[in-house]
Amino acid sequence: MLIRRSLIAFAATAMLTTAAHAQDKSIVVASTTSTQDSGLFNHLVPLFEAKTGIDVRVVAQGTGQALDTGRRGDADVVFVHAKAAEQKFVAEGFGVKRYPVMYNDFVLIGPKSDPAGINGSRNIVAALKAIKSKAAPFISRGDRSGTHIAEVNLWKVAGIDIEKELSAKTLGPWYKSIGQGMGAALNTASASNAYVLSDRGTWLSFKNRGDLIIAVEGDKQLFNQYGVMLVNPAKHPNVKKALGQVFIDWLVSPDGQKAIADYKTGGEQLFFPNANVPGA
Amino acid sequence: MDGNASALQLVFSADPALMQIVALSLAVSLTAVLCAAIIGLPLGAWIALTRFPGREAGIVVLNALMGLPPVVVGLLVYLLLSRSGPLGSWGLLFTPGAMVIAQTILVAPVIAALARQTIEDLWVEYRDELAAMAIGPARRVATLLWDARFSLLTALLAGFGRAAAEVGAIIIVGGNIDGFTRTMTTAIALETSKGDLPLAMGLGLVLIAVIIVVNALAWAARRAGERFVG
Amino acid sequence: MTMRALASDLPIVLQDVSHQVRGVAVLAGVSLTIAPGAPTVVIGPNGAGKTTLLRVMMGLIGPSAGVVTWGGRTAVSATRRAIVLQRPTMLRRSAAANIRYALGSAGIARAQWPARTEYLLALVGLADLSERPARRLSGGEQQRLALARALARDPEVMLLDEPTASLDPAATRAIEDVVRTVAASRIKVVMATHDLGEARRLAGDVVFMHHGRVIENAPAATFFDHPSTSEARRFLAGEQLD
């Protein structure tokens, strides 16, 4: 009994000490699953750690959850791709300042069989209208992520209030909202030969394509901007503002921007640094 | 981990990332079982041996808690440990410590409920004899726990199985951070969502193999123990 | 074996003791004195109340009515008494470990355990089986181990509930030898049995019970040669009592 108790105390202390010690030179970055799934962090984090010795712990959630994590003070830095939501985050005092970092683009993925007849188009709005009119199967992430919000906005531009119709149940069964991340959405689309809006990065790293190909790309409206923010230490004193700022500064520095541009999957560049572009 | 290597290649080359993930999985689950045993064994024994009002209802609830949904426990622990939550100052969210806490909550009812049943059955057998030897309540609990040790070991293994297999709780409270809170189950979830199904399946087989090895070691320990004290 | 300097539990006196279990009178108006000396054997047909009587004497059961005193005191803790139950439960450990457990529960100092364990196992003839898991001993061996466990408590009074009931003649002989040795070392033995031969062999005095009552209580010679009640006579003649 006594031995067991001692072992427990030891294990707990070891674990907590490791946690506490490791927290000394580390930051928690709340980011999105699509950014993680693209493999970008596996490329960036080692470069940053080698340069600064700061341990970057990336918690990958949906955009909505990542912002919530920032609001709760459970992360030091938030790195997502939903400009309006980010600006709101700063305006409400949860973030210090929004820095644009890079962009990638969304692509509309669809089956080779192309039931909506849109393959090869460069017009996303027309494509979405066609999908709805032909009731072609479509998978939505439905998880308030940056990708999901972008999808909803594109439907709006096409004159369709997709969320209203979904909750009023006036859509048909062709539109499925699964409430999960990009990988899961692609898996589902692959299994059911459906259309799905994806970020290019996740698509390029995705291995379970089945009969899926890129149906629509290149439309300026498919542009996906990333921003990074320090969680406001005024709201959460535990935030590691110095270390967090080092990370942000590196991301927007020539060094960090080059590292982003250097990241390739299958020979293709996924992310395009644009920290210096005003209004990004 | 290199997505292009198969799980088997990673095992045979003792890929450091894979080894780290296996080690973390074992550390978290075994620590959770240890903590849960410290709570659950005396609790189960106490309920088995004490008459109190509402005892039967308590047993029903304890048994039902064996089926606590991991994802719900994960959410609860997340809300507790978040910086905005009551225990935020502990700074445990997104660390292995949070994973141990969540899994301890999941495993403790399993151990307590199974211990309660085992001890109660044994008590029926031992009651007269222990009364004849005028054994007091504290010593009674210790005696029954020791004499039921082999059945209780099975209860611990059941608890370990539950901990090692679950992903819902630890992915929420741990954050599946690469190199820090990524375990076998959360890695499998990640590789599946990335569409790398062969790697995910391979990791799954490695996980099953690890669980079998733990059970085999426990069995061997039991056999060795039996030979010495019956 | 040294006697510890404590107040004595003898004589055990039952005054008009009755015990009801679920409306049935298991003991009815029992008045009895157990005094130091040769073994007291409690005999009677099955269901006579022998087991209950022993349990009351041990203090495991508080009677529904009547008074029990040990050495003139009521509610005495059981440190100086030991009972061997009819079907003793072996702990899931070795034979020696069972004895050590009993020594520990009786508060004997740890330093004395090795010597006492060895002595007790030898006394009951289990020295060779000391490390065998107790549950794997034969019925007779388990009964002997139970005796050793009871003796480990260094008791003044040993209560034995039909210790040879399910044993073959050889095992029975072994148990009876131990009982004789125990009685000879001035421990008061109170033993229940339904075996008349055994009663004759071991008794110093006899308590004859039937339907929860003490029918006769006399020194052995008197009881076996000149029983004073007709039930006793019929029982001794081997008749079925109703």
Image: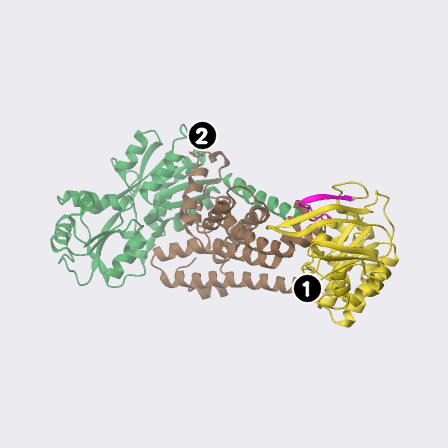
Over which residues does the magenta segment extend?
C59-69
Q: Quadrant of the N terminus of chain B?
A: bottom left
B18 drawn magenta: no
Residue A253 visible, this orientation: no
Q: What type is the residue that disc 1 sits on?
A: Arg
Foreground residue among B123 and C10: C10
Identify the residue shown where x is 82% and y is 65%. Answer: C200
Look at the image and give the colour of chain B.
brown
Farthest-out residue, top:
A234
Between the C-alphas of marks 1 and 2, the distance is 64 Å
Q: Position of residue A83 (x, y in %)?
A: 27, 38
Element under disc 1: helix
| Letter of the chain in yellow | C
C65 drawn magenta: yes
Look at the image and give the colour of chain A.
green
Identify the residue shown where x is 34% and y is 32%. Answer: A97
